[in-house]
C-alpha cells in the first residue's frame, strides 16, 4: 500500500509572534540563516502527483489538461534527479530521464550553484549569502533587494510575515519576489520567484512565476508543494502546473548509475530489477 510508505510529515507549530517586529532586511537575513541551519540528506526518494491545466489563448486552439504520478530519486551532491512515471510493484526499470540542477527537488533552497543559469536552463531560486567572512572580519554583502513587510498572514495554518522583494539589480539573477516567514522561528513557509520555463526539450522558454511551499519532514526542511505557469512563445497555449509530494523518504544510498542516463538505460535494456521500487516497498526512510 502506498499509504504505508508515506513518511510522517512533522509540521512545526509556530510560537506566538515576538512583541516587536524586526526590520524587513533582518527578517530576510534570519530566514536564510535558518534555512542554512537545516541538514540536507544525501539522497531523497519521492512520489508526487503532477497536474497540468491548459488553456487556449487564441480561437481554434484546444487547451490540454493532464495528470500523472511520478517517482523522483534525488542526489543532493550535484542536484541530479531521476524522473519516471510511478508504477507500484514494478518488476523492471521504467523509462526515465536524468536531469541535473532541477529547480523542483526537495532541497532546492539549500543547494547553491556557482554559476547563473544559461538562458535555456530551468530557473533556480536565488539563495543569497548575506554573511561573508574575510579573515576574522564578518561583513554583510550589499542588499540585493528592497524589502517591505506587508504584515502577518496565515499560510497553511501558520502565522507568517509576508515580505515583498524588489530586486535592486539583475532581476533575472535576483529572482525572489515574495517570502512568507514564521515570526517566531524564521522558518520559510512559502516563497515565490520568477524565471523562465520550458516543459519539454525543444519547447520555447516562457516567463514563469514559481510558488513553493515547505514543511518539516523528519529533521529536514522540504519543498513539498510547487506550482508554476508557462505560455508558449506564440502565445497560443497557457498552462498551470502543480506538483504535490505525498511520499518522501531518505535512503542512506542510491546507486550512482541511477543518475547516469547511459548507465541507467543499459540496466533498463538488460531487464534489471527496479531498485527504487524495491526501496519504496521495503519502506527505507529517513535515518
Image (tube, rainbow, N blue to C red):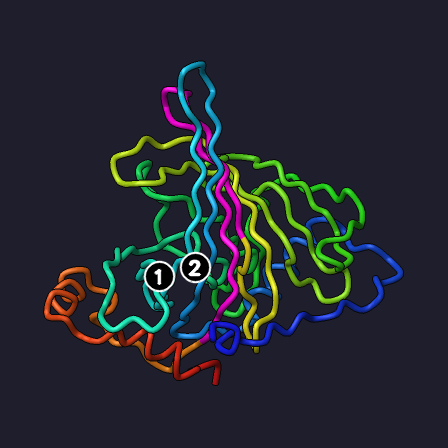
What residue is drawn where x is 46% and y is 81%?
A: 285
Which disc is residue 105 wearing? 2
The quarter of the picture where residue 113 lies is bottom left
Q: Nearer the viewer, residue 113 or 90?
A: 90
Residue 178: x percent and y percent? Answer: 63, 44
Q: Nearer the viewer, residue 220 or 185?
A: 220
Is residue 277 positioned above or below 234 on the image?
A: below
Residue 45: x percent and y percent? Answer: 40, 70
Q: Is residue 254 left or right of residue 51?
A: left
Where does the magenta region start and end? Answer: 226-249
Q: Neighbour class for label 1 at 10 Å: few (<14), some, many (≥20)?
A: many
Query: Which residue appears farthest toward the top when viewing the image?
Result: 59
Which disc is residue 79 wearing? 1
CB atoms of marks 1 and 2 within 8 Å: yes
What residue is drawn where x is 60% and y is 72%?
A: 9
Q: Neighbour class for label 2 at 10 Å: few (<14), some, many (≥20)?
A: many
SS for dot 1: loop
Q: Nearer the viewer, residue 85 or 255?
A: 85
Q: Magenta segment: does it hold 236?
A: yes
Amino acid at each position: 500500500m502506498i499509504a504505508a510508505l508515506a513518511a510522517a510529515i512533522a509540521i512545526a507549530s509556530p510560537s506566538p509572534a515576538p512583541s516587536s517586529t524586526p526590520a524587513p532586511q533582518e527578517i530576510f537575513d534570519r530566514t536564510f540563516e535558518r534555512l542554512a541551519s537545516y541538514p540536507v540528506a544525501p539522497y531523497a526518494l519521492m512520489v508526487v502527483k503532477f497536474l497540468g491545466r491548459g488553456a487556449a489563448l487564441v480561437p481554434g486552439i484546444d487547451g490540454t489538461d493532464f495528470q500523472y504520478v511520478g517517482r523522483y530519486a534525488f542526489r543532493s551532491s550535484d542536484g541530479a534527479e531521476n524522473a519516471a512515471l510511478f508504477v507500484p510493484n514494478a518488476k523492471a526499470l521504467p523509462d526515465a530521464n536524468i536531469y541535473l540542477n532541477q529547480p523542483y527537488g526537495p532541497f532546492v533552497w539549500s543547494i547553491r550553484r556557482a554559476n547563473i543559469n544559461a538562458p535555456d536552463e530551468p530557473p533556480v531560486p536565488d539563495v543569497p549569502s548575506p554573511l561573508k567572512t574575510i579573515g576574522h572580519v564578518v561583513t554583510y554583502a550589499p542588499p540585493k533587494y528592497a524589502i517591505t513587510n506587508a504584515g502577518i498572514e496565515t499560510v497553511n495554518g501558520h502565522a507568517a510575515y509576508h515580505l515583498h522583494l524588489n530586486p535592486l539589480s539583475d532581476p533575472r539573477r535576483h529572482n525572489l519576489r515574495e517570502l512568507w516567514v514564521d515570526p517566531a522561528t524564521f522558518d520559510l513557509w512559502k516563497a515565490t520567484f520568477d524565471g523562465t520555463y520550458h516543459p519539454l526539450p525543444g519547447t520555447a522558454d516562457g516567463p514563469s512565476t514559481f510558488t513553493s511551499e515547505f514543511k518539516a519532514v523528519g529533521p529536514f526542511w522540504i519543498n513539498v508543494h510547487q506550482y508554476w505557469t508557462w505560455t508558449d512563445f506564440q502565445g497560443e497555449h497557457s498552462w498551470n502546473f502543480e506538483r504535490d509530494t505525498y511520499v518522501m523518504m531518505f535512503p542512506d544510498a542510491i546507486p550512482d548509475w541511477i543518475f547516469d542516463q547511459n548507465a541507467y538505460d543499459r540496466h533498463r535494456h538488460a531487464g534489471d530489477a527496479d531498485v527504487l521500487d524495491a526501496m519504496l516497498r521495503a519502506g527505507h526512510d529517513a535515518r
